Image (cartoon, rainbow, N blue to C red):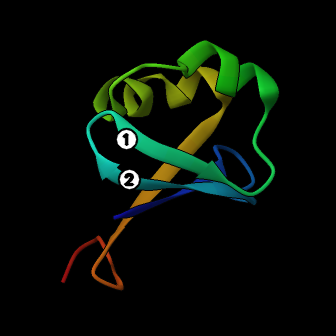
Amino acid sequence: MEIKLYHIDTLEYLGSILVRSAFDYEFRGHIDERLLSSTRGMPIKALLANLVSFDMVYDVIEGGTPAGPA
């Protein structure tokens, strides 16, 4: 699964997170060092809940298809 990150106001693409399991994920692209250090070791669900603190929203991509309404 891939999680694409966007700025909350401008929706500018900020990078992504490649998720293999709840505790096994990696950031890709230009990611704020403050975000990296603040979320290190968190399970992915906790990390996602904290993204708004960094002015970020996200979109979950599973199996090559963006999540969203059908």
Determine whether, in the image, residue 11 is placed left or right of residue 33.
left
| Residue 57 image position (x, y, % from top left) | 53, 45
| In the depicted structure, whether residue 2 falls above or below residue 9 | below
Residue matched to label 1: 24
Specify the amino acid type for callout 1. Answer: Asp
Position of residue 49 in the picture relative to residue 55 (left or right):
left
* For the residues bearing labels 1 and 2, Cβ distance under 8 angstroms: yes
Question: Sequence order check: which comes first, mark 1 or mark 2?
Answer: 2
Up the image or down, 8 lies above or below 58; here it is: above
Residue 68 placed where, x, y %? 28, 71
| Count of numbered circles on the image | 2
Residue 34, compared with residue 52, is above or below; it is above
Q: Residue at x 80, y 27 (%)?
A: 33
The residues bearing labels 1 and 2 have C-alpha atoms spaced at a distance of: 6 Å
Which label lies toward us, 1 or 2? 1
Mark 2 lies on a secondary structure that is strand
| Residue at the top extreme of this rendering | 38
Q: Quadrant of residue 35?
A: top right
Would you name the residue on which mark 2 appears? Answer: 19
* SS for callout 1: strand
Report crowding for label 1: few under 14, some 14 to 19, many 20 or more residues within 10 A (C-alpha). few
